[in-house]
Image: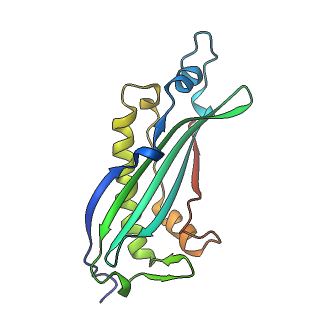
Amino acid sequence: MNNSEIDIRIAGVREVPGRSRIDRLEIMRCTHGGIFRTVRPEEITVGLSVRFDTKGSDMLSVTATATYSCIRSMVKRRLLDYTVETLFEIPGMDANITMADNRIDIPPHLMTLLLSATIGALRGMLAMRTSGTALADYPLPLINISTLVSRLTYGTESPRNPFPIANFVYN
């Protein structure tokens, strides 16, 4: 199969309920003022982590988690953890993806496609989840997919395990 010709389809996108939570009290404390201090936008940080997993012989799962935090009383407080899973159907997946030693090796051109779709889904679902909250003004920032793929492909961390990929601070 040519590198530019991969049969792939999105089989599903879902929020992972057990790994998604929004702390409305902490958001109010960190963003509204009143009896609590108001957090400046640059004090809200956004982290991102991803995980790749196989689900059968032709299915690949990409899980992405966005984490919003702020510092209050010298303690890092989690405001939001939001996780989505995108399930991809890739017939003949073993021709493009290799698995060995608890590691999934995905070619950069395919990883770029998978991450673009997953982060796009995360961005949209996160916007819907935070609408009506103080975090509605803090969408998931733009992410350089090429840098992300390079770090996952050539970095020292294993893409099999979740780890922070990007930390963003609003200015």
* Rendered location of residue 163, percent (x, y): 59, 58
Horizontal arrangement in the rendering, residue 101 relative to residue 71 (left or right):
left
**Residue at 71%, 32% in the rendered image:** 75
Q: Whole-percent x and y of residue 117?
A: 34, 59
88 vs 73: above or below: below
Residue 12 in picture, x, y percent from top left? 27, 58
Quarter in which the C terminus is drawn: top right
Count the labels in the image. 0
Which residue lies at the image location 56% right of the left edge and 64% below the top edge? 161
Which residue is most to the bottom?
A: 1
Q: Quadrant of the N terminus?
A: bottom left
Is 67 placed left or right of 107 in the picture? right
Instruction: From the top left corner, tell me how far across and down residue 65 is, in percent.
Output: 48, 50
Q: Quadrant of residue 127?
A: top left
Position of residue 142 relative to residue 161, above or below, is: above
**Residue at image point 31% right, 77% down:** 58
Looking at the image, which is closer to me, 16 or 75? 16
User: Which quadrant holds residue 157?
Assistant: bottom right
* Image color mode: rainbow
Q: Residue furthest top?
A: 35
**Residue sitting at the far right:** 74
108 or 18: nearer the viewer: 18
